[in-house]
Image (cartoon, grey):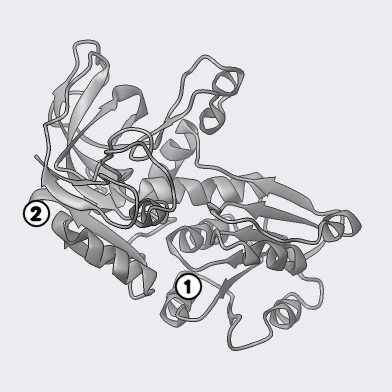
Amino acid sequence: MKAVVKEEKGVGFKIKEVDYPKLGPEEVIIQVKCVGICGTDIPIYEGVREVPLPLIPGHEFSGVIVEKGKDVKEFEIGDRVSARLVISCDKCSFCKSGYESLCEDIVEIGIDINGAFAEYVAVPYKVVHHLPEKLSFEDGASIDPIASAYRFIRKVSVTTADAVVIIGPGPIGLYALQIAVAEGAKKAIIVGAKGDESRLEVAKDLGASKTVNICQEDALEKIKEYTNGTMADVVVEATGNPAAVDFALNSAKKGGRVVLGGIFHKLSEIEPGKIVRKELKVFGSFCYSSTDFSECIELLLNKKVETARIITHILPLEKIEEGIKLVKRKEAIKVILKPGGS
């Protein structure tokens, strides 16, 4: 089959023919119909994030089951499905408490083991979810980032009394915006930077009360203005940019809640005194649970979240490098790849 492979350290992927995946007794083989380029895939491409080599990346995907192991009962060949990123051990205290993403023996599809930048992928059936007929394969490949954003908002318990600031109008930030609006946030303000102008326009269409461009205006003063001088009840950091952490702390009101959900690859400098003196509640949020994933399928079905404005480009698998360049130049929001032209 055709796949995208990270073969060696440094920059780059290779498109090549590889062996069709082997099927385990508790696995299904999925013909990949759609797979998204995630922000996590870019540092793998650039060689910044170390992964086992060789590796087929890709974890935001949907498709059709073409084979099932002998111990798989819940799924049938021909089922339309999507799948979660994390394969948990189900034995440690975190797994037993419903925190699979904190598993002591965590394995991540497309990061620790071969993923979905390929025509076919084998995954344990326990991470697979049925994809309702009303949802497209593009929707199915979007559940992973939606679920990550959903967990942000759940962590900070957004209410109708809250002014919410979301830092970063990328895919997850725009999904977090939609979910905050669906939760009834009093105000939803999204902050972008240079090159985010078109994304901020999309944010307005998706329900943002106000948008702020930190390269064109005094962002903290604007947030103060838009919150009637109080600053934000809730701040969501969705960029993974180290500089955004201190900005997030500055954006929150006294007693406010701040959630950090970006994946950071560099150290961040912050002034911890802000957390102390403002008595901020700071949360980390990594990935999502099985329950989060299921609830996000319902969000899509109930049209609380839409993917159409987020998915800006659909390309064949062979054009993955073009897709990465589009994302890095901020000419795309989300790029979906279609292996085999499926």
Task: Reply above or below: 65 against 93.
Answer: below
Q: Is residue 85 left or right of residue 21?
A: right
Q: Is residue 212 left or right of residue 169?
A: right
Q: Position of residue 219 (x, y in %)?
A: 67, 80
Number of the front mark, 1 or 2: 2
Check the picture and name the quadrant holding the N terminus: top left
Q: Nearer the viewer, residue 339 or 199?
A: 339
Q: Position of residue 224 (x, y in %)?
A: 76, 78
Q: Position of residue 211 (x, y in %)?
A: 57, 78
Task: Reply above or below: 286 against 270.
Answer: above
The residue located at (34%, 48%) in the rendering is: 9
10 Å crowding of disc 2: few (<14), some (14-19), many (20+): few
Please give the count of numbered marks on the rendered protein: 2
* Label placed on residue 203: 1
* Label placed on residue 341: 2
Q: Is residue 117 left or right of residue 286?
A: left
The residue located at (53%, 67%) in the rendering is: 168
The residue lying furthest to the top in this view is: 71
Question: For the residues marked 1 and 2, what is the alpha-carbon distance in whole angstroms?
Answer: 30 Å
Task: Reply above or below: 88 against 171.
Answer: above
Q: Nearer the viewer, residue 31 or 321?
A: 321
Residue 258 seen from this side: yes
The residue located at (73%, 50%) in the rendering is: 282
Q: Is residue 279 left or right of residue 175?
A: right
Query: In terms of secondary structure, where does tag 2 sit?
Result: helix
Q: Nearer the viewer, residue 14 or 73?
A: 14
Residue 162 seen from this side: no
The residue located at (24%, 11%) in the rendering is: 71
Q: Position of residue 236 (x, y in %)?
A: 62, 59
